[in-house]
Amino acid sequence: MISLEDTNIAAIMVEFAEDDYQKLATKLNAVNQCIDAASILYQVGFKSDEQQMQTLWKARNGVLPTIAAQRPNGSSVLIEDIAVNILDLPNLISDVKELFVKYNYTNAAVFGHVLAGNIHFVLTPNFNDKNQLVEYDQFMHELTTLVAKKYNGSLKAEHGSGRNISPFAIVEWGEKCWDIMWQIKNLFDNQNILNPDVKLTKDTSLHTKNLKELNSVDDQIDKCMECGYCEPVCLSRNLSLTPRQRNTVARKIETLEGEQKQK
């Protein structure tokens, strides 16, 4: 019996393909034998129907928007991706989940690409709260040390590093490699014009600065995490501003009105 209250459960989705049905059947038979020998709580089974397959993938792809829509008002959606050796992945996930508990990230989730040793995690911190900002700073220091030092892993897996990770590049690469990176940067961009602080920075607290605060405006707008994924298919995208722009403007108006009242 699977309980949704159990935080130690996980789902694994695996997709197999071959150039003919006989080869695929042989492969699936071997895999099913392994599954039968394992202690798996519930097996959905392999699906070949296109609609059924898409339904399963939608469930996986729905993790992020579901968490974003259920997050507390005023909180942000933060996603990072880290990678370690595949054999270290179970222990890494356990350690990351312990950090979630320590810093009270009760709405957090982990998903990713197991065969690449790559996981994403989603947090919903409220950067309007100074205490939560301090805790987030502590979380990032512990997380980056965990990944880089304990597991000799990568602080960025499949997506590019940015201002949230650049302060910790030295943790992963060490001072010698970090200095070489700066030398290369200075050769091509000695005035630091190109993406300053995005890949490399000397500001060790950059990840806590210039954060977008998502204040509460409206029940529907509050669910928006401003990712822009809806824009290409939105029927109203050309009506005036794009959906993300409209929500951003609404939030800015609310912020300015609040500032005006305080004066």
Image (tube, helix red, strand yellow):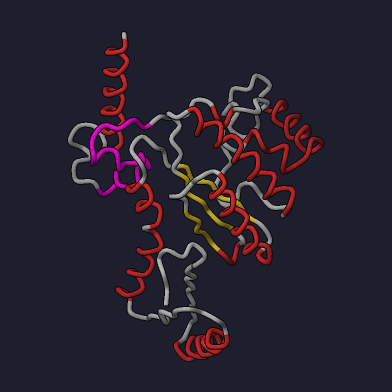
Please name the residue shown 36% across and 34% down the image.
Answer: 74
Q: Furthest-top residue in view?
A: 263
- Give the main secondary structure, helix, strand or loop, of the magenta stretch: loop
Report the span colored magenta.
214-233
Residue 136 left/right relative to 146: left
**Image coords of residue 139 (percent x, y):** 59, 41
Q: Residue at x 68, y 28 (%)?
A: 188
Q: Residue furthest right?
A: 176
Q: Is residue 8 left or right of residue 262?
A: right
Question: Which quarter shows the N terminus?
Answer: bottom left
Instruction: Point out residue 79 in the picture as x, y percentages from the top left corner.
Output: 49, 46
Q: Position of residue 16 (x, y in %)?
A: 49, 77
Res 126 quadrant in image: top left
Q: Is residue 251 magenta?
A: no
In the rendering, at what x and y percent does residue 86 appear?
65, 65
The residue nearer to you, when weighing 145 against 173, is: 145
Residue shown at the point (48%, 62%) measured from the top left: 7
